[in-house]
Image: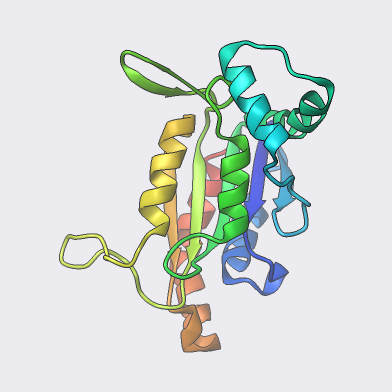
Amino acid sequence: MTNLLYINASPRGEVSAANQASLIFTNALTDSVKVDRLDLFEAQLPEVTLEITAAKMKFAMGLDLDDEEARQWSAITNLVSQFLEADSYLFAIPMWNFSIPYKLKQYIDLITHPGLTFTSDENGPKGLASGPATLIYSRGGDYSPKDGKPDPFDFQSPYMNAWTRLVGLNPVSEVLVQRTMAGPDALTETLDAQRSKLITLANGLG
């Protein structure tokens, strides 16, 4: 059985273009894939507190945590465990102000720690997660590369590619669901254009 962690970064549920594309992906999965869905806007993610930051520093230095630090740090390690236990990953990510939604950034900040999701040595960082990731980006306009160069307003793709490399996800496949603000017909067109790629990626999981 393959465990897929489906991380939804949209508060719009199934109306979300990214989640509509994700539905094409998940509908194409075989029975050997188990889906664990994490809706970030409903998950009540812990806030970063003084105790959590203290616990992070003590953990990194191998020091003992006090009771309250340990209690709050356990919420972090629970999220990390859920992340690391997955065999593959699906991210539904709408573009907000050229970048990612704040809840996804919060989630990334909560789980990205040395000794938990990556280590570092003289050769640089090494991720402690593994497995393929599909990143579905929904965008109101067209932010695909132009003339062989990245779109200067696309901060989704560079950030997510840097972070997924840091924590060890590989290979990483990007699916662009664009021009979603151009109306229902444009949305249907972009979903149809990406359907074959989404199905192929899903079938590749087993």
Residue 197 picture quarter: bottom left
Query: Residue at point 63% right, 71% down?
Result: 16
Residue 92 sits in quarter: bottom right
- Please say if 65 is above or below 101: above
- Give the total number of marks visible in the rendering: 0
The answer to whether 76 is drawn above or below residue 151 in the figure is above
- From this viewpoint, is residue 206 visible? no
Name which residue lies at 65% across and 48% down: 6
Q: How is the image coloured?
A: rainbow
Quadrant where the N terminus is found in the figure: top right
**Residue 81 spot, x, y in % from top left:** 70, 28
Residue 123 coordinates in the image, percent (x, y): 31, 16
Query: Is residue 89 rendered to the left or right of residue 201?
Result: right
- Residue 134, percent from left and from top: 50, 48
Q: Nearer the viewer, residue 158 or 73?
A: 73
In this view of the protein, can residue 16 be seen by the observer? yes
Comparing 153 with 200, the one in front is 153
Instruction: Report the side of 67 relative to 161 (left or right).
Output: right
Look at the picture and state if 87 lies above or below 103. above
For the C terminus, the quadrant is top right
Q: Nearest the camera: 53 or 138?
A: 53
> Is residue 63 depicted above or below 72 in this figure?
above
Front one among 29 and 109: 109
Q: In x, y percent, where is residue 161? A: 40, 45
Q: Which residue is most to the left?
A: 147
Residue drawn at point x = 62 percent, y = 26 percent: 56
